[in-house]
Amino acid sequence: MKKIVLSLGGSILVPSLESNRIAQYRDILREISAKYRIYVVVGGGGEARRYINAARSMDIDEATSDELGILITRINASLLMWALGEDAYPDIAESYTDAIKFGNSGKIVVMGGITPGQTTDAVAAVLAERLNADLLLNITAIDGIYSEDPKKNPAATKFSHLTPDGLIDIVSGGRMGAGANNIIDLVAAKMIQRSSLSMIVIDGTKPENIPDALIRGKFDGTVVSDDKKQLLPL
């Protein structure tokens, strides 16, 4: 069974506790787990950034602020794990070794952050490398990778395909402080480059985009790969 690692943004899964997408993603993950071995790395989103900003206002150092963000990612991950019930491994992986071991159960593996200074995108990329995953799926609020932030510049160019080198060129100017909110961070991009991982970036505000891409090959995001061979469906 092919292995897919999903980097699921916290602002996608839990934009707020009152208007979350947990039930939608529960159903989507159950659908795709019938065909693929699934590992989900959940981000902290706006809630993590609020805690980090509160920590900074009290002059708490960046590494400790990151630890706070990691706790929030694990809370978000726990909500998803419990919603999945028996379809998920009944514990949050707190290391790559945990995730690999939990995956041997055949159940969906859910985790959050691991290390201060490392975003959940980077965690997902390292996990994909450790697993020799068939695909890294970056689920974000933008429908692909652009030459610039399309919210700031509507004329920005959207890329349907990038090589790992091209991805690094785009993200190399990104900020790396606690709570950084870029399309993907430089550490993750370098992991993708060195491991020749295939990644797709997709708009997660419409959860149905995920099975459409993975199962039906209906995809309108960005593919990052060494070549332009047909990637979807896997």
Image (spheres, helix red, strand yellow):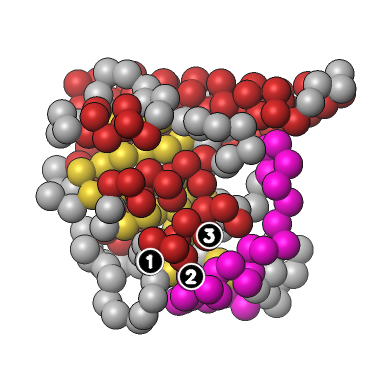
The dot on residue 162 is none
Q: Nearer the viewer, residue 69 or 87?
A: 69
In percent of width and height, residue 136 lies at 37, 54
| Residue that numbered label 1 is attached to | 196
Label 1 amino acid? Ser
Q: Is residue 221 visible?
A: no
Determine whether 97 is above or below 75 in the image. Answer: below
Q: Residues within 10 Å of mark 3 (few under 14, many from 20)?
A: many
Quadrant of the rendered image containing residue 96: top left
Residues drawn in magenta: 157-180
**Between disc 1 and disc 2, whose residue precedes?**
2
Q: How many marks?
A: 3
Q: Secondary structure at mark 3?
A: helix
Q: Nearer the viewer, residue 207 or 78?
A: 78
Name the residue: 57% across, 27% down. Answer: 70
Q: Residues within 10 Å of mark 1 (few under 14, many from 20)?
A: some
Name the residue: 25% across, 24% down. Answer: 89
Q: Residues within 10 Å of mark 2 (few under 14, many from 20)?
A: many
Name the residue: 27% across, 77% down. Answer: 230
C-alpha gap between disc 3 and disc 1: 10 Å
**Between disc 3 and disc 1, whose residue precedes?**
3
Compared across the picture, whether 116 is left or right of 189 comes to right
In percent of width and height, residue 97 lies at 32, 31
Label 2 amino acid? Pro
**Between disc 3 and disc 2, whose residue precedes?**
2
Label 3 amino acid? Ala
| Residue that numbered label 3 is attached to | 189
Q: Are marks 1 and 2 in contact (CB under 8 Å)?
A: yes
Q: Are marks 3 and 2 in contact (CB under 8 Å)?
A: yes
Q: Secondary structure at mark 2?
A: helix
The dot on residue 164 is 2
